[in-house]
Image (cartoon, grey):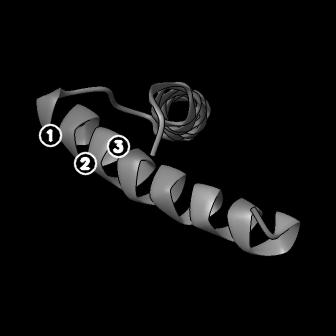
Amino acid sequence: MSRRTALVAAAELLAWWAVLALLWLVFISSVDTLERIVGASVAAIGALVARAGRRAVSWR
C-alpha cells in the first residue's frame, strides 16, 4: 500500500467517523462521558463498515 493510498484511506475513515459521531450526538438526549465513549466506538465501527461497503461496490 502506497503512502498516498494510506492517507486517502485514513481521511475517508476519519470523515465517516466524524459524520457518524455527529449524527449520534444529534440523536441522543444526554451527553455524558459514557455516551461519548459509546458513540465514538460505534461511529468507528460504522466507519469501517461504510468504507468496506463502498469499496465492495466500487471494486477498488
Which residue position is annotated with label 2?
Answer: 38
Above or below 21: residue 7: above
Q: Give the x, y percent position of residue 34.
A: 14, 40
Could you tell which of marks 1 and 3 lies nearer the N-terminus? 1
Q: Are marks 2 and 1 in contact (CB under 8 Å)?
A: yes
Residue 54, labelled with which disc?
none
Which residue position is annotated with label 1?
Answer: 34
Above or below 1: residue 42: below
Q: Are marks 2 and 3 in contact (CB under 8 Å)?
A: yes
Spatial CA distance of label 1 from label 3 is 8 Å
Which residue is at the front of the view, 17 or 34? 17
- Dot 3 surroundings within 10 Å: few (below 14), some, or many (20 or more)? many
Left or right of 53 on screen, residue 40: left
Left or right of 3 on screen, residue 9: right
Q: Give the x, y percent position of residue 12.
A: 60, 34
Spatial CA distance of label 2 from label 1 is 6 Å
Residue 39, labelled with which disc?
3
Q: Give the x, y percent position of residue 3.
A: 45, 27
- Amino acid marked by disc 1: Leu
